Amino acid sequence: MSAASTTQTLTAQELAQRRLASITGVDASGVRRAQNIKAIYVYEVPVRIWHWINVAAILTLCITGYFIGKPPPTMPGEASANYLMGYIRFAHFASGYILAVGLLGRAYWALVGNHHARELFSVPIFQKAYWREALNMVRWYMFLIPKPNQYVGHNPLARLVMFSGFLLTATYMIITGLALYGEGAQMGSWQERMFGWVIVLFGTSQDLHTWHRLGMWAMVIFITVHVYAAIREDIMGRQSMVSTMISGHRTFK
Amino acid sequence: METFYEVMRRKGISRRSFLKYCSLTATSLGLAPSFIPHIAHAMENKPRTPVLWLHGLECTCCTESFIRSAHPLAKDVVLSMLSLDYDDTLMAAAGHQAEAILEEIMTQYKGKYILAVEGNPPLNEDGMFCIQSGKPFVEKLKRVAKDSKAIIAWGSCASWGCVQAAKPNPTQATPIHKVITDKPIIKVPGCPPIPEVMTGVITYMLTFDRVPELDRQGRPKMFYSQRIHDKCYRRPHFDAGQFVESWDDESARKGYCLYKMGCKGPTTYNACSTVQWNEGTSFPIKAGHGCIGCSEEGFWDRGSFYDRLTNIRQFGIESNADKVGGTAAAIVGATVAAHAAISVAKRARDNAAARKQAASASNNA
């Protein structure tokens, strides 16, 4: 059927409907012709809220942390009229606590939530099937296969990166961060009593500061890979990504 | 046996001065006024404890510091009450006479004397890099430590190794706690330690007959539980974000925070910013130079004294966290960008191929 013949067979009523659809966006015939998209509920409300709070906390932590190590240019005026480093450090510490408490809450949700909530905390590295699928994803990212599998939760490769790139880094940052916070909170504070050993483990306070800063860069690398992979999968993969973390539903194509 | 009080009276110190000294000691040790009578009582009744002071690989800056203990009372009293029976730098005797005193105290006060060590033993070549009375220092250290009650490790040499243990440490200079493992060791690091801290620690041990409360790394909490930064008089400038950017700028003249000039105050545990030096006259930061962290372990090997982000030695190259992390992040970022570009190009080619195939298919049909 050619385009010309279609136009000829349209009635006046249909033409009016089309015009209305392009104005209002309400297009019943379009919906009828649309693919029947399958969706599954993956990320429950607490997981999604945690994810976006975490985004804000980690961005704040990276930016303020960068400036704690390399402060902005000196402030003019009296010392009493400024509190720039004080605010930067406050934002850093507050976000750090949000990250720490959030991760505890997230760990709790892994226990009571659906099975997708547990993917972050474990990697089935002893299962052959897991590595087969992970390898499949590697081949997909190396442009070796035309299309990947469809995955409901995290794909196996993503799960590995979430565990090692996010969970381990975040835990490391929380522990080293609390040890450093304990220095300011002084001896006898719970932070110092619980995490003061970390300083001894790393050598000196100066060493721990250095390693904590390296952790920030590890987190920056994770964010880069995470955001890129999510957007790319959304466009080129076979399931939704970004919207899933907003609505909770994963759709397939 | 003579008590501390008797020694002091013999040295011409009045009872009034003695009581003043007791309250000063209580204050400097962070004790409540109710402890003053305890200190006085202890001084009046306890037989004095001999202290043997050994010198290994060191520069004698600890001794120089110690004899300059700022408060005249602390200096006079501690120096006279300490029966510093053996200290080869300060004692009048020398040679065989001196060694005879050492032997005498060790047998007479077996298990009762305090051993203070300045410097450390080099272990390489069987300890041949430090010879005293014809024998390696490490042997003397082990021999004297064997019957001591407790050991004070004076300064960064004895506590951490200091400059002689800096890389590559050719003499294998080793801190005391790695050589003597069966005695309580009190680390009093610093290069040198603050004189008042030294006299304070020794007074505490003699008065209360016990080791002061130590932190995880074996330093007395009363002097080493806070960082220079915590009590620094320039701290308000740090909080305000006011920094010296170069040595001769306006901020330097105004006395702003030296953080950006590599001041190690935020990572150094010591009492300089409260006790200060030379009778409370000044300390490095007050003189306009950042703290170099001389009381921290391995401060010689942590890169420049003038960098805030210091070297990561573990990578084997001169590099800091931002260089390593920033480079890694840049590589990952570039890889991601390249991957994205290839993805776009490949999709465009696949789509074109698909269209071509569809067109040829419809043509064939």
Image (tube, coloured by chain):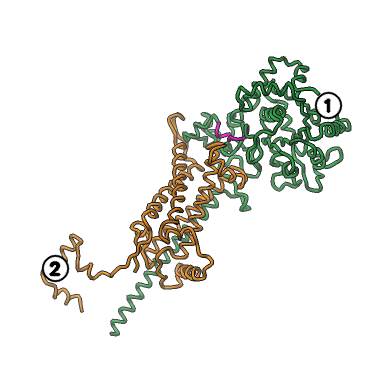
Residue B157 on the magenta segment: no
Question: Which of the 4 image quadrants contains residue B345?
Answer: bottom left
Q: Secondary structure at mark 2?
A: helix
Is B1 displayed left or right of B356 in the figure? right
Picture colour for chain B? green
User: How many numbered dots are placed on residues in this image?
Assistant: 2
Q: CA distance from mark 2 to mark 1?
A: 116 Å
Name the kind of residue labelled 1 in the image.
Ala
Q: Chain of mark 1?
A: B
Q: Is residue B16 above or below residue A119?
A: above
Q: Which residue is mark 2?
A: A15
Q: Which residue is mark 1?
A: B92
Residue at the spot 14% in from the left edge and 68% down from the top edge: A15
Question: Which of the 4 image quadrants contains residue B248?
Answer: top right
Q: Secondary structure at mark 1?
A: loop
Residue B225 on the magenta segment: yes
Of B223 and B23, nearer the camera is B23
Q: Position of residue B147 (x, y in %)?
A: 80, 37
Q: Which chain is orange?
A: A
Is B37 displayed left or right of A104 in the figure? right
Q: Is residue A215 above or below residue B227?
A: below
Of B214 and A177, nearer the camera is B214
Is A213 displayed left or right of B190 in the figure? left
Please provide the residue range marked out in magenta. Answer: B223-231
Q: Is residue A129 above or below residue B31?
A: below
Magenta segment, prevailing SS (helix, strand or loop):
helix
Res B71 seen here: yes
